[in-house]
Image (cartoon, rainbow, N blue to C red):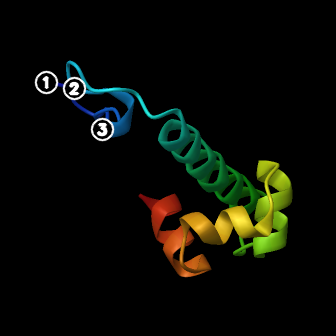
Amino acid sequence: MTTEPGTAPPPAAAEPEKGERVDGRRLRSERTKQLIVEACMSLVRENSQMPTAIQIAERAGYSVRSVFERFPDLVALRVAATD
């Protein structure tokens, strides 16, 4: 698969192999993770400071538990947001 310069390849979970079943739970989890990262980035743009887990969860529309189910700590979330 080729991608245009400057674009990231799609996540592997989004393109199942031929004959492979799509796992809706995995897709939802990846979508939740992406929304959490986007919420973090949005809050950083607004305040120029690292937001709390509560602020990130509220902005994303999820619980704090959902944040920490996908990221071991806020540093890992910060790394994902800067990627």
Name the one closer to the observer, 65 or 1. 65
Find numbered disc 1 in the image and state the secondary structure of the residue it sits on: loop
Q: Residue 76: x and y, percent?
A: 50, 74
Tell me: 23 left or right of 10: right
Q: Residue 52: x and y, percent?
A: 78, 76
Looking at marks 1 and 2 on the same chain, the residue that comes earlier in the sequence is marked by: 1
CA gap, disc 3 to disc 1?
A: 12 Å
Q: Residue at x 52, y 33 (%)?
A: 24
Looking at marks 3 and 1 on the same chain, the residue that comes earlier in the sequence is marked by: 1
Q: Nearer the viewer, mark 3 or mark 1?
A: 3
Name of the residue lying farthest toward the left: 1
Looking at marks 2 and 3 on the same chain, the residue that comes earlier in the sequence is marked by: 3
Q: Residue 56: x and y, percent?
A: 76, 63
Find numbered disc 2 in the image and state the secondary structure of the residue it sits on: loop
Tell me: 34 left or right of 22: right
Give, as a three-letter code, the residue at label 1. Answer: Met
Q: Which residue is mark 2?
A: 17
